[in-house]
Image (cartoon, helix red, strand yellow):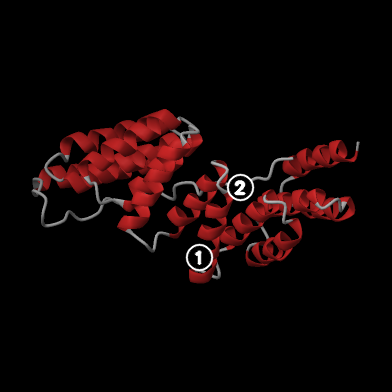
């Protein structure tokens, strides 16, 4: 039985940010062309023309070389598209290129960690998340991703500690409760996990993975009927996931 714990996917496209005073200023023509190409890339992505969007961002990185922050933001956006296409090696390369231009980007560090996590390079992913948190302690998803990565490394006590602090500092963040529940269940403390599952669902009742994980914790406890109840709730949100859960429950009953 596999509990589903997830990395937070990179968010929406970043707008090209204003350059910091410490960087050289690009020409006005380069800024205008970068802004135009940003719009081109965004439209291309909306139309599912992902290769065109990536090429536009890569072009920005070239023409805006006089402003590392603008070029870095473009490469970050390209990396996010690669992530959405499950091209994780390409995403990691784009994020590294972005960080070479702007090493203080917590978002790029976090997203690099996510790409490395998808590539199952967990120790390197953890390092990236730690750097992201060091750069921006308020970047909640990086702290959460640290917990996920400790879990994947089998270091459940560290994962539990991360989630405990995250819940303390951000009591309305549902993924922290789900992560804590998954960790407790994997640690053989399924009964302790139940209130955390319930809290996660109460904060975000539309996340199907929360019901899936709750059902698995019930199966660990041998409470199949309660697991089936979670499956029924899941069916209205994600029928395919509910069907998969049903097969897991059936195997568990054999």
Mark 1: secondary structure: helix
Where residue 24 appears, as percent x and y from the top left, is: 8, 48
Query: In screen coordinates, is 150 left or right of 188?
Result: left
Image quadrant in which the N terminus is located: top right
Q: Position of residue 111 (x, y in %)?
A: 40, 44
- Residue 193 in sight: yes
Q: Looking at the image, which is closer to me, 31 or 212?
A: 212
Is residue 37 in sight in this rendering? no
Which label belongs to residue 165? 1
Residues 136 and 90: in front is 136
- Label 2 SS: loop
**Few, some or many residues within 10 Å of mark 1 (<14, 14–19, 20+):** few
* For the residues bearing labels 2 and 1, Cβ distance under 8 angstroms: no
**Does label 2 or label 1 sit earlier along the sequence?**
2
Q: In the rendered image, which quarter is residue 211 located in?
A: bottom right
Residue 152 in the image: state x and y as whole percent: 56, 42
**Residue 42 - label:** none
| Quarter residue 71 falls in | top left
User: Is the residue 28 above or below the residue 56 in the image?
Assistant: below
Q: Nearer the viewer, residue 83 or 30?
A: 83
- Height in image: 136 above or below 6? below
- Name the foreground residue: 180 vs 89: 180
Q: Is 204 situated left or right of 11 in this image?
A: right
Near mark 2 (Cα within 10 A), the count class, few <14, some 14-19 or many ≥20, is many
Give above or below for 168 relative to 182. Answer: below
Q: Position of residue 36 (x, y in %)?
A: 25, 44
**Residue under label 2:** 5
Q: Residue at x 71, y 66 (%)?
A: 195
State which mark lies toward you, 2 or 1. Answer: 1
* Residue in view at x 42 percent, y 50 percent: 12
């Amino acid at each position: 039985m596999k509990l589903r714990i997830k990395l937070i996917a990179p968010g929406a496209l970043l707008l090209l940010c204003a350059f910091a005073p410490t960087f050289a200023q690009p020409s006005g023509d380069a800024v205008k062309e970068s802004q135009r190409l940003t719009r081109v890339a965004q439209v291309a992505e909306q139309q599912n023309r992902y290769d065109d969007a990536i090429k536009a961002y890569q072009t920005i990185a070239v023409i805006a070389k006089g402003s590392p922050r603008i070029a870095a933001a473009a490469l970050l956006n390209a990396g996010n598209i690669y992530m959405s296409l499950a091209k994780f090696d390409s995403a990691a390369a784009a994020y590294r290129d972005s960080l070479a231009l702007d090493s203080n980007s917590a978002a790029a560090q976090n997203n690099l960690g996510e790409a490395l996590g998808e590539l199952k390079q967990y120790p390197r992913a953890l390092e990236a998340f730690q750097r992201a948190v060091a750069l921006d302690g308020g970047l909640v998803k990086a702290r959460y991703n640290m917990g996920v990565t400790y879990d994947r490394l089998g270091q459940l006590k560290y994962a539990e500690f991360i989630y405990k602090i995250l819940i303390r500092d951000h009591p309305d963040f549902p993924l922290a409760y789900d992560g804590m529940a998954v960790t407790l269940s994997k640690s053989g403390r399924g009964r302790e996990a139940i209130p955390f599952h319930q809290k996660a669902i109460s904060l975000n009742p539309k996340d199907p993975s929360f019901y899936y994980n709750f059902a698995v914790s019930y199966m660990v406890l041998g409470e199949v009927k309660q697991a089936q109840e979670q499956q029924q709730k899941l069916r209205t949100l994600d029928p395919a996931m509910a069907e998969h859960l049903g097969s897991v429950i059936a195997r568990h009953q054999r």
